[in-house]
Image (cartoon, rainbow, N blue to C red):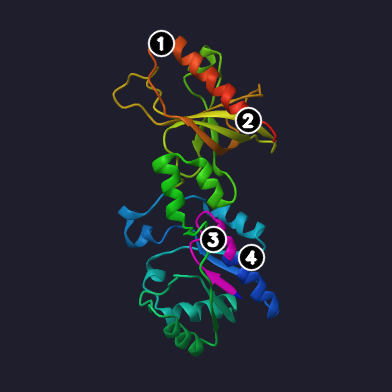
Amino acid sequence: MAVVGMFDGVHAGHRFLLDTLKADAAAHGLEPLAVTFSNHPFDEIAPARSPRLLTTPAEKAALLTDAGVTPAVIPFDAELRHTSSLDFLHMLRNRFNVERLLLGFNNRFGHDAPSDFHDYLAIARNCGVELVQGMEYSHNGFGVSSSVIRGLLSDNGDAEGAAQLLGRPYTLAGTVEHGRQIGRKLGFPTANLQPSDTRKLIPLPGVYAARAILPDGSPCGAVVNIGHRPTVDNSKAPQLSIEAHLLQFSGNLYGAEMQLQFIKRLRAEQKFPSLDALRMAIDADRREAASILQPQ
């Protein structure tokens, strides 16, 4: 039994649908399968409108697996874009042996996508596929969507609100690269993260309390600055940087893979009148982050 969708973020609404899938599949003696895409459909349909991703294909596949379903990640390419609803169902039946399909609330597929569930039912019968309509999910009376979560992160830096809808903190993974060593000179060495996938959404610039997941899998509290370092970078076109000051770690991470879990935005990035003022602000950020991150 299958469900089809982008599943970007594998958020609370997605997991509600996946729980429905698993229950229905179990009742009919079928294996639950999530057919999803390695790229956003807008990459093919309208590239200028294609959003940043909440999860990379690998992250999404891992989250779907953790949710108890088998992921099937396929590219959304020109061929798929021009596939009709009927041919798409035939593809699911022939390629993945789908006998039963759960149609998510407001989910549509096929370039000729019908607007009515009953039209889909008629098409599915011609393919030997049973179609089931999923229910709508809401959080505190509001719908949950990947676009809402993107807005919380990119427009407001609302890591807490995003975590509520995702069911976990928003995570950014990448490689630790050499920086200008300015943080070290200030007494607060930082790990400069280069995201592993340029399609991933980077939260609104500012200072965040975060949890770093080190290469050995252990967690470490962190203060993360996303921005252009206005106090120390006076160039005409400063590059956006992601710098993590780890609260209880000393060692060499250069070239290593690290994850950052964003817990709470502490403040906007600022230009300070002196390095001493910047040092005092970082120290205050460090203390606030430590208070937020301490075990409850």
State which tag comes first along the sequence, 4 or 2: 4
Marks 1 and 2 sit apart, C-alpha to C-alpha, by 26 Å
Secondary structure category for the residue under label 2 = strand
In the image, which disc is placed on residue 263?
A: none
Marks 4 and 2 sit apart, C-alpha to C-alpha, by 33 Å
Q: Residue furthest left?
A: 236
- At x 46%, y 88%, the residue is 122
Q: Can residue 246 be seen?
A: yes
Judged by depth in the image, the label closer to the viewer, 4 or 1, is 1
State which tag comes first along the sequence, 1 or 2: 2
Marks 3 and 4 sit apart, C-alpha to C-alpha, by 18 Å
Query: Which residue has dot 2 on it?
Result: 221
State which tag comes first along the sequence, 3 or 1: 3
Query: Which residue has dot 3 on it?
Result: 13
The answer to whether mark 4 and mark 1 are in CB contact below 8 A is no
Q: Position of residue 285 (x, y in %)?
A: 53, 23
Crowdedness near tag 3: few (<14), some (14–19) or many (≥20) residues, C-alpha within 10 Å:
many
Query: Which residue has dot 1 on it?
Result: 274
Q: Identify residue type, mark 3.
A: Gly
Marks 3 and 1 sit apart, C-alpha to C-alpha, by 47 Å
Q: Which residues are magenta?
A: 2-16
Judged by depth in the image, the label closer to the viewer, 2 or 3, is 3
Count of numbered labels shown in the rendering: 4
Query: Which residue has dot 4 on it?
Result: 70
Task: Classify residue 219 by image quadrant.
Answer: top right
State which tag comes first along the sequence, 4 or 1: 4
